[in-house]
Amino acid sequence: MRTIRSYVLRQGRISKAQLRAYRELLPKYSISYSESPLDLGRLFGRNAPKILEIGFGMGESSAAIAQANPQHDYLGIEVHTPGVGSLLNKIEAAHITNFRVIQHDATEVVRNMIPPASLSGIQIFFPDPWPKRRHHKRRLIQPEFVELLCERLKTGGYLHLATDWKDYAEHILSVLGSEPRLANTARDYAQRPKYRPLTKFEQRGLRLGHPVWDIVFRKCLD
């Protein structure tokens, strides 16, 4: 498994509200990293479809999706503390009970904590595109990682990515298309599914003429 990180931990600013939520709410909604597989049913206390979100940023879409789909359980991975604090604030304010957070490297979490064939869906919205060619090796979406994700999906489960970088969209389409257990749900790029809300950042980009590409594949073979 690759050891090159797809992210850089930047100091960044954290607001007082985010810091308070991080300190007070992390024990309530988070799961500590472990090298042992999770019992996802026990974690959420029920038998419901489990959706993994990798890199939820500030949590705007994550909270909205979880609130709109109470029949699903969501597990979000993020490394940046301000984003974790922001999402925890949103979860608490909206009384969202079907979301849990892991603050750790996504590759290690997926490899060690997510059991095979346990997920109904995986969502990766606007991963770092690493646009410079010499940095492409840092992109999260690589064949080895997609193979790992595919193993964690149930048959029929979906892998949904979105990016506003055309070059990265083409790369994602090529990598996912090369995985024999995945099938594209569209001819190339999909229409944005209704469950993925538009973020403020995305709306601003669309007004400026910056398109977004959604890519949705499903696992068709074990």
Image (spheres, helix red, strand yellow):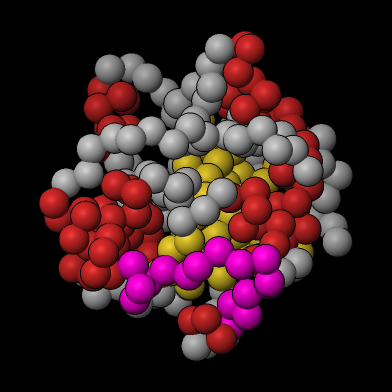
> Is 169 on the left or on the right of 19, as rendered?
right
The region drawn magenta spans: 26-41
Please tell me which residue is depicted at 56% across the width and 49% down the height of the picture: 105
Nearer to us in this view, 148 or 104: 104
Tell me which secondary structure the magenta stretch mostly adopts: loop
Please tell me which residue is depicted at 74% across the width and 38% down the height of the picture: 2
Please tell me which residue is depicted at 64% across the width and 20% down the height of the picture: 136
Nearer to us in this view, 171 or 2: 2
The spot of residue 119 in percent (x, y) is: 64, 66
Q: Quadrant of residue 93?
A: bottom left
Q: Residue furthest top?
A: 133
> Is 33 on the left or on the right of 212, as rendered?
right
Q: Is residue 187 visible?
A: no
Residue 116, placed above or below residue 136: below
Please tell me which residue is depicted at 40% across the width and 74% down the height of the picture: 98
The spot of residue 53 in percent (x, y) is: 51, 54
Q: Quadrant of residue 175?
A: top right
Residue 5, placed above or below residue 220: above
Nearer to us in this view, 62 or 78: 78
For the C terminus, the image quarter is bottom right
Residue 22, placed above or below residue 47: above
Q: Residue furthest left?
A: 16
For the N terminus, the image quarter is top right
